[in-house]
Image (spheres, helix red, strand yellow):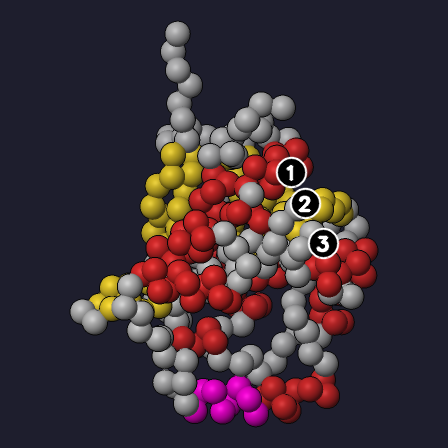
């Protein structure tokens, strides 16, 4: 009996506006999968964030990119903003040769994804937001304070220079101190986020990513984006994650017309720590075949 081909991860390098956007594509090579998904990771994470789920989504042509300044993607020559990140996501869809796709975003990626759906609606079939309900916002009367902090950060370019770690394990430990996640999940992130030098290991991500943003979106911006979304949206909430403690979560979800929510056990990185139930929810939402029966 002839075995069915097995989808496998492959490295991807996209040239967009003279910059390299790196990624991982998981598919059956040379076969056309009807379901295509662009995956956007969280702040200071990278494409490896979606590796634990890939084998559980076997019917999907999945592309997980390193957002600019992260992982193996190039650093930008400008300040990083959420609206600009939406452009890079849309440009990645075009560069890989897709006309339309679904977008799955975790944390920051889930903030970017609705902006793509609002700004380029013809490119987006649906959204899957993992532990994200829109941008962290500020109101107009907070602008001057944020502007002062942003300028101060930019005038001290070495303020956020990478710390040196004697071993990769030290970088993993540092990551575990900043986020509740399994060690194996932290190691996956670190494997794509550090480089070895003669004297130790340093972060690959652009230090400019840590500079304070001068101008954040307001609640009115987020509301306008959410109300403009016409495609189906699934939000996956971790019981012990960030969304359950944020008072604006329910209101923001209610702003989206075609929306459903699934709550699962776990912390903020549940798609890495316990990928099986997350993948099952994604397969059910997209109508694709689960990897483990059912």
Is 78 or 44 nearer to us in this picture?
A: 44
Task: Give coordinates of residue 103: x percent, y percent.
Answer: 57, 48
Q: Position of residue 218 (x, y in %)?
A: 71, 75
Q: Taken as a whole, is the magenta stretch helix, strand or loop?
A: helix
Residue at horizontal 66 percent and vertical 51 percent from the top: 238
Q: Quadrant of residue 169?
A: bottom left
**From where the camera sits, is residue 118 visible?**
no
Is disc 2 surrounded by few (<14), some (14 to 19) or many (20+) residues within 10 Å? some
Identify residue for label 1. Answer: 281
Q: Which residue is mark 3?
A: 229
> Which of the two residues, 24 or 120, is positioned nearer the viewer here?
24
Of the image marks 1 and 3, the number of the one nearer the N terminus: 3
Tag 1 and tag 2, C-beta contact below 8 Å: yes
Identify which residue is drawn at 61% across, 80% down.
215
Q: CA distance from mark 2 to mark 3?
A: 24 Å
| Residue 264: mark in rendering | 2
Residue 85 is a magenta residue: no
Q: Provide the residue span drawn in magenta.
A: 148-155
Horizontal side of residue 275 vs 28, given as left or right: right
- Separation (CA) of disc 1 from disc 3: 21 Å
* Residue 235 x/y as whole percent: 69, 49
- Sequence-wise, the earlier of marks 1 and 2 is 2
């Amino acid at each position: 009996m002839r075995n069915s081909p097995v989808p496998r991860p492959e490295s991807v390098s996209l040239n967009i506006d003279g910059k390299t956007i790196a990624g991982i594509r998981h598919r059956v090579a040379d076969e056309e999968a009807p379901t295509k998904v662009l995956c956007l990771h969280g702040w200071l994470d990278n494409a490896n964030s979606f590796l634990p789920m890939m084998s559980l989504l076997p019917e999907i042509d999945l592309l997980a990119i390193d957002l600019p300044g992260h992982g193996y993607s190039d650093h930008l020559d400008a300040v990083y903003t959420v609206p600009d990140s939406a452009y890079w996501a849309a440009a990645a869809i075009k560069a890989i040769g897709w006309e339309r796709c679904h977008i799955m975003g975790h944390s920051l990626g889930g903030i970017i994804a609705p902006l793509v759906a609002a700004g380029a609606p013809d490119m987006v079939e649906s959204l899957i937001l993992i532990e994200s309900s829109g941008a962290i916002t500020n109101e107009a009367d907070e602008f001057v304070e944020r502007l002062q902090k942003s300028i101060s950060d930019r005038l001290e370019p070495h303020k956020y220079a990478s710390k040196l770690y004697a071993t990769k394990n030290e970088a993993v430990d540092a990551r575990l101190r900043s986020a509740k996640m399994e060690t194996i999940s932290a190691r996956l992130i670190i494997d794509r986020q550090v480089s070895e030098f003669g004297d130790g290991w340093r972060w690959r991500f652009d230090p400019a990513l840590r500079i304070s943003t001068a101008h954040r979106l307001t609640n009115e911006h987020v509301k306008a984006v959410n109300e403009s979304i016409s495609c189906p949206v699934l939000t996956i909430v971790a019981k012990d994650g960030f969304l359950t403690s944020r008072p604006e979560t329910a209101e923001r979800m209610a702003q989206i017309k075609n929306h459903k929510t699934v709550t699962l056990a776990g912390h903020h990185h549940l798609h890495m720590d316990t990928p099986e139930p997350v993948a099952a929810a994604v397969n059910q939402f997209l109508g694709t075949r689960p990897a483990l029966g059912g």
